Amino acid sequence: MSIPDLTLVAMPPAMNIGWLSAEALWALEQSEVIVAPLPVERFYGPDSGWWQKITWSDSPAGVIAKGLEEQQRVVYLYPEGGGPASVWQMLDQHPQWLKWIKRTARVWPITLAADWWTDPKELGGRWQLLAEDDQKRPSMSVSVASSEQHRPWLPASLAQSIVVETMRVKSLSRPSWWSTRPLYGIRLLVLREGEGAVGAIRDLSHWGAEVALEPILTIEPAPLNEQWWRSLAPYQWTIFTSANAVHFTMRALRTRRLELARFGGKVAAVGSATARALAEYGVFAALQAKDSFDQEGLLQAFESEPLAGARVLWFTGDRSRPRLSDGLKARGADVDMVPVYQNCQRPLSQWAVSQIHARSVHGLLYSSSSLVSELLNQLDDGTIEVLRQIPGFSIGRQTSLALRKAGLLVSGEAPRASWHELAQTVARYFEHDHDKR
């Protein structure tokens, strides 16, 4: 069972989308349902995928409730100062939803008063916490990486506005009501950077958790064979198994002044996040995994497709499992597996090691089996023994197998291999059993 996911975005009187914060833009791009109570003529919208998802309704309460009941991600764009009273009445009738609501600042950048900040040493660590906008509503503190070269995994529309600090993130004094958030007091460690990780950190932080980003595997462009790019014959299928693969592929194509259409055929995506990443570049995924967003799920989705003699191009990372390739070859396909990004090791900081030793961390998020192996390689036996007592949360089956093989706890596994599902799995674990804190 999922938890509600509703983001409230207060719009300025002119309803100019250009005034939306980075927080709001992120929510809009990731949502499945967007509701606005005013006519479309009142908005000045961009040509984007999320703009096409808006339901224009002067009775938005029913649309919001239906989306939440169906476990979808919902964004409510409402005019400053109110919006239809029926929405607030609906929320009053569902107090179980209120604690999960995420509110965003409408204007970027967020200006912080100096007296809101507290020395991080006083709070025991370097944690990703929350800022506040002028209405004292919670929103994440983010910084800007202006160069795409440094953060190539970011969508172009967000590259100028979203990057989570990985070095010195100060802690913030919170208003007293913040203690009512369902994950208040929970400290979590994320070991992998990337677009999905940013989204999970945002979700968990909005729900009250303190999240530290300490990547031990970073993502960089992989070396590519220039002759291969120039001498390609058509393929029947082009496959992407992560949003990172999409962004790095599109960047490589743009650098070489090529188009994805050059490869021909249809496009397949491993899951909804990958399909959304493709949509940002105007590419439609004709096939997508449904039940599990992993290689096994995509292989199952191909069962109804004729593959004998088909040429398949798979853009991926350097540490991807060959399960998908092997399965497609077994059905007669000719598969070219092309790594467009590579994983680079980064030592875990001494601060993070000390937090594990002191058991100041309530849980770690694991996004791949290779991440588990890398973490174990970096830690000494004593630290690993302590780690075995700390809840671990896995993004999927293969990661869970790696954790159990190492003797580490699997306190929760995402029902589908996505960062959003992983964040919800963590939230359910701590929300339903306060003794686990």
Image: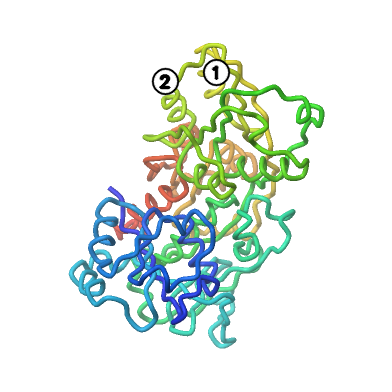
Relative to residue 180, is residue 103 drawn left or right?
right
Badge 1 amino acid: Asp
Q: Using the image as rendered, state which of residue 108 and residue 221 is in the foreground.
A: 108
Please tell me which residue is depicted at 46% across the width and 59% down the height of the picture: 51
- Can you give x and y, in whole percent of width and height, for residue 405 in the image? 48, 31
Q: Callout 1: helix, strand or loop?
A: helix
Give the structural element (helix, strand or loop) at label 2: helix
Question: Of the numbered discs in the image, which one, if any, rests on residue 384?
Answer: none
| Residue at the disc numbered 1 | 326
For this rendering, which residue is in front, 165 or 292?
292
Q: Is residue 434 above or below residue 260?
A: below
Query: Dot 1, how many residues are within 10 Å of its Cα: few (below 14), some (14-19), or many (20+)?
Result: few
Q: Give the Cα separation between the discs numbered 2 and 1.
A: 14 Å
The residue that disc 2 covers is: 303
How many residues crowd mark 2 within 10 Å: few (<14), some (14–19), many (20+)? few
Where residue 177 sits in the image (x, y, percent)?
Answer: 35, 79
Up/down of 396 relative to 435, above or below: above
Which image quadrant for residue 178?
A: bottom left
